[in-house]
Amino acid sequence: MLSPRYWIFIVIVLAAIGYSMLKPASAPPSAVVSDCNDATPWNCREDGDTSPIVSPSDPFKYEYVQLDNGLRVLLVSTPGTDKAAAAMTVATGSGDDPDGREGLAHFLEHMLFLGTEPYPEAGEYQAFISRHGGSHNAFTAHQQTTYFFSIDNDAMSGALDRFAPFFISPSFDEAYVDREKNAVHAEYSAKIKDDFRRIFSAEKQAMNPAHPYAGFATGNLDTLSDRPDRKIRDDLIEFYQQHYSADQMTLVLAGNYPLQQLQDWAKNHFSAVPKRDIQLADSRPPMFVPEQLPLDVNIEPVKEIRRLQFTFPMPETQSLYQYKPLQLLSNLIGHEGEGSILALLKEKGWAEGLSAGRSISTRFESNLVVQIELTRSGLLHVDNITQILEHYVDLLKAQPIPAYLMTEQQQLSEMSFRFQQHGRLSDYAVRLSSNLQVYPPEQVIHGDYLWRPIAQPELAPFLDALNMDNVLRTLIAPGVTTEMVDPWYNTPMRIRPSNYRATDVATDGLEQLHLPAPNPFIPQDFSLNSEAEQTVPEILIDQPGQQLWYYPEHEFLQPRSRITLELQHADIATPRGMVLAQLYTRAVNEALNTYSYPAHLAGLSYGLSANTRGLQLMLSGYQDKLPELLKRVLEGMQQVNISDDQFQRYQASLQRNLENQLKAKPYERGIAELKRQIYSPSFNEQQLLAELGSVSRADVEAFANALKGQTATRMYIHGSMSKADAEAVAHQVAEVYPANPEQQSELSVLKLPAGKFQQSLDLDHKDKVMVLYLQGQDTSDHNRARIALLGQMISAPYYQYMRTEQQLGYIVFATVYPQRSVPGLVFIVQSPEHSPSDLLSHSQTFWNSYQDSLANMSDDEFAAFKDGLINLLLQPARNMSEKADLFWRDIDLQRTGFDTSRAIASEVESLTLAEIQALYQRLILQAEVPWLLFTQGDPVPDWQPINRLPREQMTPFELPR
């Protein structure tokens, strides 16, 4: 997105408006909560209490208010944080696009960033946010548009100065209207081969064209062009005035401030948002024409995707949010344990995955969607798979859903609420502003977790809608029969009445289907860590080939632990070894899936993956049952038995994944090739594909056996687990994988030679791309600080010039790009029209002009950039998982002082503007460091081909200590 501004006009006007502009909320009707008990004391409330229900683990404070203009506001005081955030959700989206103006709501979202009356310069908002260590964005959905930002806490007032006028006085500058149409079109063009968008658009062709959801939501130059009798700017202004009304907006202000300060800002900045006379529709056409269903749709994707998808139109669920009927049905249909649909489909070799969930929910209707990822064999059994789904639905209808299943859902959900953890503040603000649109104020936080058992009469309409006469069945696969194309993405497709008849199909094994058994992994013990507090992890075992690091968690009072186990195995560091490792991890994960899925539902998870150093096993979740899960996973890693059919499926699946990676977006392919060039060891997809066909089932089983006694282990345990239990876990692992120091391996970044090198990507994509990497040649903390600061300074102006002013593409960014301890910068532009040479030439123009900006930069502006970066580096972990990640990063880099961020922040503090100006000259204007360029389109003249890099002679960077 882009950028606006604001301030003097609104401050003068609002200074005269008193505190009475705020009043206690009176938004959606209050929900009476009757779930008061000792386990959920937060549900014990006085009648009429509309204050938000808050988790006992939540350190934040909340207050809900409503301005006189009808704007609903949630204030969030966040003690201990150094970031502030805001989010505004408007109850309008692509579903409100006028006929013939597809994408208008999305276009309007773009335009609000491009100037307001108090801040007419288009880049001001973005520049201010970037200067103060923040980020911003927006999105347009079917029935909402949400704008949000995060920023250094002490810059919140200035950010609101620039943010609030989006909703009061946007300028809709005519020059930027004309330019930004191109940006919207570039976004459309960049996703023209994105299968998600193509499938989404093609499915809409089967819907009632009178229903708003059936429309094209993105927009392009055709739908957003001026008409002989009407300019697009006029339509933008009219749409804004018809839909952007204060009483249809919900705002969240969050920061490390007293609630009264946040309330004053809400009043002073947003009381002038106009309340308009908006008439909300009391009905809308059905999503499918009566008697239209059932339908069968075929869609041919770009990538090798094989999916069978069922879309069931459903009644609305917003009024039943306390019971979550669609989530209940989705969880049962999407279960992966014993007796599940997926377990039977995998046994037959027809499917690799299954998911179920709600795709749309408005006050008029909802949808339940079931997606099944098919094997090649599954493509031949579409009707059998349909019958299996239908039989499971019949089980749900045969008798009331057992009470224990609904009680478990309620118990697990309230447990998640009890131990709620925060992540990024801006994400939380977006979630709360969206929730405020559909939940009463007291449930704005808790409403996502509130899950009461539903009575059969309330569930019956949803069960009734789950039938094969009320479904859009979509088959997505290469080579399916098609007879038309989607008008927006040219996707080959076909729409026909469904030919499925259950009486024509006979499927074996239906008797294996049954509802889930009670979950054995629901934790009962929520004890916290009783060990002495530590500031950093300590090493408990340090022997050749074996390390155990340990940290007892006391800051975040959670009964959770995380175990990170790295099994280093030198033989993986070849293309063949990597292929075998990926097939091995797939076999283990598949064998454990039915067992581990209930653990996943109960807040436990594990992941086993392969990298060029070996295998990584990560387990996390509630401490109570974590050792039990670890024991079973280690057993599964030892007992690898693969049938020929399974091996062929895993091999075909890996081939498909690798081939699909080669069809990623051009800029994504550029980044992938960049990493392959600078890392050692590293392999590209072609190298792995070349080995894949020659490996056998016996090779994979031999690989599994070779791991025993052939690994070096490095382990980190963080959380509520005791020191003694951590050591016991390490001994448990050592019994299975005894330490072998000869297997120790490292992932290195290669030191590139000076010069300019390029590689053409040669992709089947119309867009052009430039991915340019500049590698720093010094891994000292001082150099990392210098390049990080330059990256922060240059990011917003590069975006403003390349995207907003020159309209060169939708995907544009310049950013610091550290790889392990090696600093660097990357410049990326993906364009529908401009060649890599043009993009590089425009970049050079910007770089030449930006040296003037650096030369004229004030001390205050430079200090703001430094403060923003320092705050970012010193930002405390927001939850236990983030804290564990930070410690593991330093363990991985062998920086056992655990001071990386503090050390770099200290170096930033000492930097001078003159030093950054000199760095800019050497790094960019004089190109004294290595430049790697990855292009889609014609090559850039006078650059050396990248295959001339003397890779065998390049040395790796040493890790700083």
Image (cartoon, helix red, strand yellow):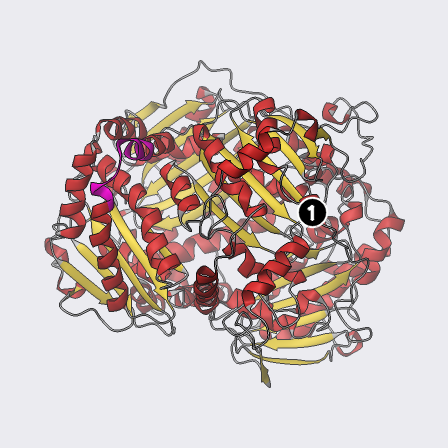
From the viewer's perspective, tell me whether residue 609 is left or right of residue 99. left
Instruction: Name the residue located 44 percent from the left edge and 25 percent from the top edge.
Output: 726
Instruction: Name the residue located 81 percent from the left edge and 45 percent from the top edge.
Output: 402
Evaluate whether residue 624 shows in this view. Answer: no
Give residue 883's quadrant in the image.
top left
Q: Is residue 914 placed above or below 175 in the rendered structure?
A: above
Closest to the observer: 684 or 26?
26
Residue 503 on the magenta segment: no
| Residue 916: percent from left, percent from top | 20, 38
Which is the main secondary structure of the residues drawn in magenta? Answer: helix
Give the residue type that dot 1 points to. Answer: Gln
Q: Quadrant of the C terminus?
A: top left
Mark 1: give few (<14), some (14-19) or many (20+) Cα within 10 Å.
Answer: some
From the viewer's perspective, tell me whether residue 319 is left or right of residue 706. right
| Residue bounds of the magenta highlight | 853-866
Instruction: Name the residue located 76 percent from the left edge and 74 percent from the top edge.
Output: 294
From the viewer's perspective, tell me whether residue 196 is left or right of residue 863. right
| Residue 327: percent from left, percent from top | 71, 49
Instruction: Name the residue located 51 percent from the left edge and 42 percent from the top edge.
Output: 163
Tell me the element at label 1.
helix
Residue 864 on the magenta segment: yes
| Residue 463: percent from left, percent from top | 82, 57
Residue lying at the far right of the rendered structure: 457
Give residue 129's quadrant in the image.
top left
